[in-house]
Each structure stands twice: as C-alpha cells, then as structure tokens.
Amino acid sequence: MALRSTLSVALLALCCSPAFAADPSAVKREEVGNRVSENIPAIPAELLDKLNRYQNTRGAGLAGWTREGCLLISTRFAETAQVHRVCEPMGMREQLTFYPEPVSGVAASPSKAQVNGFIFGKDKGGDEFSQLYWFDFGTRDVSLLTDGKRSQNGGALFSPDGKWMAYAGTGRNGTDRDIYVRNVATGETKPVVTQGGSWGATDFSPDGKRLLVSRYVSAAESYPGVVDLDSGKLEMFPVDGGKAAFGGFAFAADGRSVYYVSDEPIDGKPQEFQTLRFHDPAANKFEVLTASIPWDVDGFTLSEDDKRLAYVTNEDGISKLHAIELPSHTPIALPDLPIGVIGGFEFSPDGKRLAVTLNSATSPSDTYVIDLAARKLDRWTRSEVGGLDASKFVAPTLVRYTTFDQVEGKPRTIPAFYYRPANVPKGKKLPVIINIHGGPEGQSLPTFSPTAQFLANELGVAMLVPNVRGSTGYGKTYLSLDNAEKREDSVKDIGALLDWIDKQPELDASRIGVYGGSYGGYMVLASLMHYSDRIRAGVDIVGISDFTTFLTNTESYRRDLRRAEYGDERTPQMQEVFARISPARHSDRIASRLFVAQGKNDPRVPYTEAEQIVKAVRNNGKPVWYLLFNDEGHGFQKKANADYFGAATMLFWQQNLIGE
C-alpha cells in the first residue's frame, strides 16, 4: 500500500489565520475546482515563486524498447506522466500519449510480433480501475483492450511471437484478480485462471503454449504455477517449506527450465533473503546463482533470445546491477554505474544493449544504456532540476539506531537515511522531520526527493527516513516483526528514533515533525497518539486511522491481501487489537498539530479514513488542516494538485515546527 506518487515540495508562508488561531474548533472551508481545503491559510504568490524551481524537477523512467531500437520513456512535461520515445543518446523526446490522467504499465510488443506498438494502462481520477489500451505505431491509433467498466486490469505481457497477450483483471466479480489471455490478431479474450485470489502472469513459454503464473498472498507468501493454454490445466509448483516469497519466474530457452527469485529453504536451511535460482526439473539440476550475495534480488529480466539475464540486488538500499551469459551463467563485465537506485531495466530486442533507469539522492531518475560488448555506458535522458545548482543537493548518510528489543542478545538496530543541511552554524540546532514510508512492506531508499532538498537547502530542516521493522530489504524475519498484533512495535521504533534525535547535538528534540503516506500516514497518527509530548506536528497523507473501518471499506479486491498483513478484523482477537491501536479511537491522545491530506477516489485507503480522524481530533478541541482532492486517489498524481499540497505542507511546517 505504498504511496506511489512523488509528492511535490512547497514553501513556507507568513502568519496564522486569525480565525484559525482564535478558535481551534472553527472550520474555514474553501472549494477551488477539484480541491477542498479546510483551515489552510492562503499561500502568498510571491513566496511560491521561490518554490517553483523545486516543483519543476522531473525524472525520466524506462518503459521499454521498440523494435527499431528506440526507448519508451515515462516522464511528465505537463500535468501528468506520459509515454515518450527517444531514439538516440540525449535525443529528442517525442511525446506519444496525451491524457489528463497519468499513463503507466507500459508493455511494448516483441520484435517478432506482427503488430508494432505498446500497451498502456490508465485510470480515472486516481480510482485505480485501470483499463488497458493499445497504441499502434503504424496508425497512431489508440484502442481499448479491456472491458472499460469498473474493473482493475494490469500486468500485461506478450508471448515471444507477439500472438498472445496475458494480463490480470478483476472483471469477473470485482474481487478476484483472474488471468486472461487475448489473441492479439482477433481480440478474442478468455480467462485462464479463475481459482480466486490475486493472480499475475509472469512469462510465456518460448512456444507460447504455456504461461507461468503466481498467486500473491503477501510480501512473504506467493504460490507459482503453470497453465497449459490449450487444455486450461493449471499445475501448481511445490513450495519448499510450504510457504515462501517469490519475486519473479521465467522460462529458459529450452521451455523446460526456469529462472526465479525466492526465499525458499535451501537443503532444508531457512533463508532470510530472496535469491536468484535456476531449476531444470528434467535434469534434476538446481543452482542458486546469488548464493554469495547476502541481500535480496529485487528482480531480473531475460533478453528476447534468452542468451542473457540481468538482475538487481538491493544492498542496504543501494542497487547493484549484474548480468550473466546463458546457459553458462558466466558473469558479464559491466561498466561502473552511478551509485543509486535502479528502477526498470530491459535488454534491447537484439540483446546487445541493456537499458536501466538510475536515480540517486542528488539526481532525479534518468535512463542509461549499456553497450554490453564495449562495456560502455551512455546517458539517453537528462532530466531537469528546475534550473537549480545540483552540486548543492544534499546526499543522505545511512545511520543505525538502537531500538527497544534485542537480536541474539544484542540491541536491534534500525536503519535510517539522514539528510543533514550543509554548512550548519556551530551551536545551531536543526528542526527535524521523520519521513515514514508506506507499505507497510515498503522500503525507503536514497532516491531524489525535492522535498528533502528544499527542507535542507531553503529551510534548514533535517530529515530522517527510517526503515522500521516490517520493511522489505532486510530479510524475512525483519519483514514479519510488525505483523498483526505486533503492529505497534514499529511505532516503538519511532519512539527509539526520538531518543536518538535527543542525543544528537545538532538536532533540536523540541522541534520534531512526522510525515508519511498510506501506511506511513497511520504511523504518523500512531506516533502522535503515543508521543504527542515529543512531536510538535504531523502530516498524514491518505493514511489509515482505524484498521476495522479501513478493512471494511477498502476495495474488495484488496481486502484479503491486507488481512494477511494487518490481521482479520472479523476475529475477536484482532478486533481487540484494532480497538487498542487505531488512532481514530484514541484521538484524545493526539495533542500535536495535524494536517491531513486525501484523494476522494482512493480505492486503497478510502477518504472516510481521513474524514473520521479529522472529525475526531476537532471534536477534542484541536485544530486540524484538511485537504481533499476530488480528482485524485492514493496519492497526488497531477502536478497542480501536488504543488498545492507541497506548498500547504511547507506552510504547515513553518507555522507549527520551524518557528521558535
């Protein structure tokens, strides 16, 4: 449930609204277009001018290759991210899609296909009921592929010859995510997996007659299988240990062997991390290809000719790219890449080049291409940073702080990225914002954040970005430490971070704010519930305020997935837990200043979660800023909306955190 959009930053404004200051329970409501704001003061236009450059940074992410050797890129030049084409290093970006809603889920047709184009997904107003569309390079026409109704569709992929397309969708009953296969030439579509649950397709066999699939239960549990497309027979693979996580599954060139990522036991020994594996069932050959790397493999991709494989490891939040020859599994020497986080990566149709999206704390996402034979790295896009001096951007340091429990007799440590303003005068204590990720199975990474840069360079505010227990990237044990009745143990990790802040001579423990989206929004509210005496203010974006109402009202296709993580609200045991930990039921304990922001069309965390916490806190005589966008969902995808939210947020910090 991680917050997927990048929330823009904003600038401070001046003084409080007199009515707001005089009567905390008063509500000053304003409606402008699709925006509803309550108790948010006007933001002076002259101050927004300074913020404008930070709000106009943008990135460019890889979306795929065309058969001609061009790249499809996702980037934003107006209000939303759209598909562009780039055909040479630092070449012109040709925009291909033009919609008021963002476009995502791009899948380009393979080089052997009779058709030439790409599939993309698009929803309405952030409702996440995405439909799939076909963009044809020959005619430039766009056609709808899915039912166009209130269903969610995604995960499209082509067979190697391009004759078939597979995708997952909820069209049958609105709850289960089934798998469909479509004949590209005729448009005939049939469901091939309708067993119930949340399914996804991962790869066609080389002859296009079988399809690898997987049923997702949680971040720690998936079940892979294969469908014979002629007979419709589904065969599930045995899972060593009975339960494991799987991060990908693909056929090798022989159509019999498979490559996959899993944390299944090896020789009966439990594994903490997900490793890349090879299995040839006919030859009874099994090989762990990343046994020497004590970190998760985040994903892999094969070339169209199945002669090369690339994979990425997540090593303490930093991405490492690897490539091997197939079937020998011989490592391919790669050029040095900038230190950062790798997004998408994909081989060119001829398998001779590898495109990657790279992001770092001081540079937005851009796409690079590696010539494998020459070991040469070329930059294909250079995204804008609003005309700012990038050399002044602050890179975070990785710190670890001790928390309340122990591991094998030693204090457990929690990793966090620390953005510290440069050139801090001696003796000056910095206000600090704790930015908590969503998920809860997410992981904060040292990626480019205009918010962090603005806070550090313009406002002199430090930011700490912790990966509390329950985060991915640190092993399956760490991932499970906040499940169900252990939910508030992750909140205790924030309490331990408050203790750490108190010991840092450059940080002001009397001026601490918390910020988070989605599950991170719950963490904000829970932190205020437990530590209002130590936290001045909090910003909750699309956050859970009561787990029972959240699980009751979230879209049906997500409910069982969330129960696997949070617990089942229908059982007496979890009802008791939720009554104890849900902030909306203990709003009297929230004394800090609060800002709540929400999208009206959010299918994950319904807007009622925001409205009930706003009402509850106000009923206790505490003032709350509230922002609702009627054309957004789980996060703010439209630039104008994100810009306003960012501006309001910085105003909130100025008035409630930064001032002495």
Image: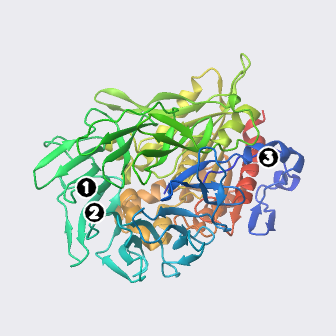
Looking at the image, can residue 533 be seen?
no
Q: What residue does disc 2 label?
A: 206
Q: Residue at x 75, y 34 (%)?
A: 459
- Please name the amino acid that badge 3 sits on: Asn
Dot 3 falls on a residue whose secondary structure is helix
Dot 1 falls on a residue whose secondary structure is loop
Residue 200 in the image: state x and y as whole percent: 36, 65
Q: What residue does disc 3 label?
A: 52
Colouring mode (rainbow / by chain / secondary structure / one colour)? rainbow
Dot 2 falls on a residue whose secondary structure is loop
Label 3 and label 2: CA atoms lie apart by: 50 Å
Q: Residues within 10 Å of mark 2 (few under 14, many from 20)?
A: many
Dot in front, 3 or 2: 2
Mark 1 vs 3: CB contact within 8 A: no
Mark 1 vs 2: CB contact within 8 A: yes
Residue 554 in the image: state x and y as whole percent: 49, 69
Q: Residues within 10 Å of mark 1 (few under 14, many from 20)?
A: some
Left or right: 159, with 512 as reference point? left
Residue 600, compared with residue 230, is above or below; it is above
- Please name the amino acid that badge 2 sits on: Pro
**Which tag, 1 or 2, sits closer to the chain's start?**
2
Q: What residue does disc 1 label?
A: 253
Q: Quadrant location of residue 505?
A: top right
